[in-house]
Every structure is written in C-alpha cells, then in structure tokens.
C-alpha cells in the first residue's frame, strides 16, 4: 500500500507529510519562470506596426484587397513574396507561405475551403458598413453575417476573403 499524503499548512510554508516524514513544498515565490524585467521607455513606446497574413499568392491577394476593399498597395518586394497595403496607421501585409519556413515558424494555412477560418480576424472600420459589405461580396468575398447593429451601437458585418481569412467590417465605436 503506498504511503498516504497529507498537506499541512503552516504560517511560513506548505508542508507535505508522507508516511510520517515532513517534506517542504516549493515556496510560492519560486517558479521556473524568471521575473519580468522592468518596463523601460523603449518598451513602453511599443506600437502595433503591422499584421502579416501568409497566403499562397501575394500579388493576387493584393489585387483582391484593392478591388474588394479599395486599399492602395504600398511596398511590394521585387520577389513578389511580400507586399503591403496602405491601410491607415497599421499596415496590412501579405507574405508568401514559403516565407514561414525561411522565418523558422509554422502556421495553419488560410484556405477558403477550410470549414472554419483561422483564429484571427482582420477588422476594417468604415462609416458605410452596408456599402463595404456589398462591395466585398461583389468582389468575391463570402458573406458570413449581414450588417447588424450591436447592443453598443456599432454596426458589424463579417465576410471571408478569397483565401478564407475572416474579415470584420465595422463602424467606428463611439
């Protein structure tokens, strides 16, 4: 029969008794994770710069977003393996799926025929959600949710692009 364990709490530390022997439990402040370094001015100045979506065809995706959402292309690498759209304060970029291996990372593929989109949503804000929704669907997006007004007053609609990426079209939150 294995020895029985009984936890005893004392004012200083937790102790476990095994078959009459006392064994100290690790103290609450000892972890394998180092403490976070202090926040510096450089860290507190972090800004969300861009989102990169890995796609099978970068230029085709840029062209699709120009047509469906009216964005204007920005930087395009001569290799056509990376390109950016001018989308406001935060850049939306697309990289060829082969770039994942070059970067040493692995992700799921965004595919239109996947039953569910990947666990990310791109949100594009506009005063005319219904118009943006109509334009996106006419350009080839799949309609997921028609424009609806949320309880907090924001109008929201959902589509999937030709790669299967989930996109929210929404009015600004007031």
Image (cartoon, grey):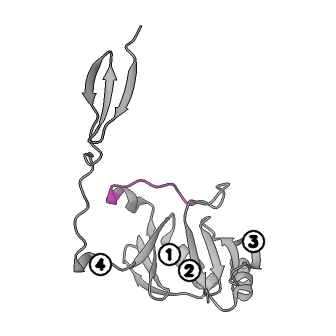
Category of crowding for the residue at label 2, using alpha-carbon neighbours closer than 10 angstroms: few (below 14), some (14–19), many (at least 20): some
Report whether 140 appears left or right of 88.
right
| 4 or 3: tag closer to the N-terminus | 4
- Looking at the rendering, in which quadrant would you find the C terminus? bottom right
Q: Secondary structure at mark 3?
A: strand
Which of the two marks, 4 or 3, is nearer to us in this view? 4
Q: Secondary structure at mark 1?
A: helix
What residue occupies the far front of the structure in this picture?
Answer: 11
- Residue placed under numbered mark 4 in the picture: 44
Residue occupying image coordinates x 62% and y 60%: 117
Q: CA distance from mark 3 to mark 1?
A: 27 Å
Q: Are marks 3 and 1 in contact (CB under 8 Å)?
A: no
Q: CA distance from mark 3 to mark 2?
A: 24 Å
Q: Residue 27: percent from the left, percent from the top?
A: 26, 42
Task: Return the residue at label 3.
Answer: 145
* Quarter occupied by residue 169: bottom right
From mark 1 to mark 2, how far is it between C-alphas? 6 Å
SS for tag 4? helix
- The picture quadrant where one finds residue 132 is bottom right
The residue to which callout 1 is attached is: 59
Magenta-tinted stretch: 102-110
In this rendering, the label closer to the viewer, 2 or 4 = 4
């Amino acid at each position: 029969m294995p020895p029985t364990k009984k936890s005893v709490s004392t004012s200083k530390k937790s102790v476990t008794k095994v078959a009459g022997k006392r064994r100290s439990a690790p103290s609450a402040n000892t972890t394998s994770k180092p403490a976070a370094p202090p926040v510096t001015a450089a860290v507190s100045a972090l800004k969300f710069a861009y989102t990169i979506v890995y796609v099978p065809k970068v230029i085709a995706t840029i062209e699709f977003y120009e047509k469906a959402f009216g964005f204007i292309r920005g930087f395009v690498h001569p290799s056509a393996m990376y390109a950016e759209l001018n989308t406001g304060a935060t850049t939306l970029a697309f990289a060829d799926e082969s770039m994942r291996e070059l970067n040493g990372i692995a992700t799921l593929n965004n595919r239109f025929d996947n039953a569910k989109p990947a666990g990310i949503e791109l949100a594009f804000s506009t005063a005319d959600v219904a118009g943006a929704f109509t334009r996106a669907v006419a350009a080839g997006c799949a309609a997921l949710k028609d424009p609806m007004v949320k309880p907090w007053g924001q109008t929201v609609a959902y589509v999937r692009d030709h790669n299967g990426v989930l996109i929210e079209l929404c009015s600004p939150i007031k």
